[in-house]
Image (cartoon, helix red, strand yellow):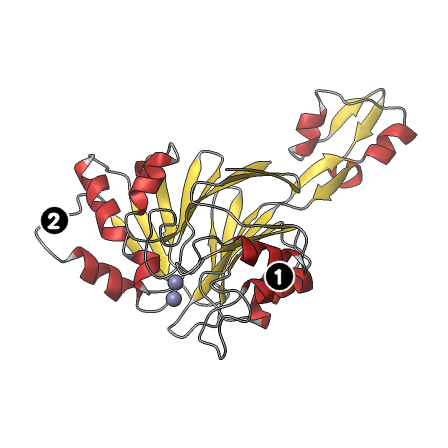
Amino acid sequence: MMFEFTFLGTGAMKPTLKRFTSSLLIRYRGEVIMMDAGEGIQMRAYQSGFSPMKIDRIFITHFHGDHFYGLPGMIFTMAKSGRDRPLTIYGPRRAGEFVEQLLSVGYGRVPFKLNIEELSPGSTVEGDGYEVRAFRTDHGPPSLGYVFKEADSYNVDRAKMEEHGLKPHPKFRLLKEGKEIELKGMVLRPEEWLVPVPGDSLVYTGDTRPSPRVVEAAEGATALVHESTYLHGDVQDDRGHSTAQEAAMLARDAGVKALFLTHISPRYRDASPLLEQARAIFANTYLPSDLTKVIVKKGEMEVSD
Ligand SMILES: [Zn+2]
Ligand SMILES: [Zn+2]
């Protein structure tokens, strides 16, 4: 089991050449899911070697321009490229109204089925081998974070294999599919021989001030992609956003494996002080650039720029 995610936009509020505004692509078993769609993000998708035509689901965290102004351009491209399969856009309250308004400007027409689904905190979208669960964040306008989680899988119990002198066998595949098998004169039943392997998960916060809801949603997650707009000390009273230090404290409290800082304010030409600040609290922190790719496989991560 594995999935990968690519940062398309890691900047906050306004795009710069270095950092476009928020967007992330998740690829899982041939399916492509987008989280947020900042302005011009289809260009970053092409740069990442990926056609936006492949996207079937887009989850928007909230309706500030830096998280969804990329939608009309991308949908227009899909229309012009002859797309006919449906596209579903998910978002918090008023998603239907805002997306429809965006698409009603000009003479463009969407020739494929476009579904818009409004989600509430706790809503779950079931996919093939995964689910995406929405949770409430603390930002200002209605806002949601999303937990992408692979389904749990099963392995044959190693200790039990050794105990019975068994070696890996092609028939184990059937056992993992839930079937009884016969091996060396024994009948092996799935309920007795399989141990669960928890699926990996990715938590994407969108914009939020530090929130206990994020800790709850991210408890034990593999990867936490947390907004980190500012360096702690650069801002006084808050504002609906988090600092690098706050993101790191949340990652530590939630016990995640890795933290990825995103939604970096354009005021930081060199954002490395944010990384240093976060690493002082939570060592396994990364500062992705646009197009940084992460492969997640059985709890392990491989990060490449
Ligand atoms: Zn934002
Ligand atoms: Zn915002």
In front: mark 2 or mark 1? 1
Say whether residue 92 is left or right of residue 178. Answer: left
Say whether residue 236 is left or right of residue 170. Answer: left
Establish whether ligand 1 lies closer than 8 Å to the Cβ of label 2: no
The spot of residue 185 in percent (x, y) is 85, 21
Give the residue displayed 80% in from the left and 39% down from the top: 192
Give the amino acid at mark 2: Gly
The N terminus: image quadrant: top right
Give the residue displayed 55% in from the left and 58% down from the top: 274
Say whether residue 180 is left or right of residue 106. Answer: right
The answer to which of 241 and 255 lies nearer the viewer is: 241
Residue 175 seen in the figure: yes
Q: Mark 2 or 1 closer to N-term?
A: 2
Give the amino acid at mark 1: Ala
Under circle 2, the secondary element is loop
Q: Residue furthest bottom?
A: 237
Residue tagged by mark 1? 248
The answer to which of 163 and 289 lies nearer the viewer is: 289
Residue tagged by mark 2? 108
Q: Is residue 157 above or below residue 246?
A: above
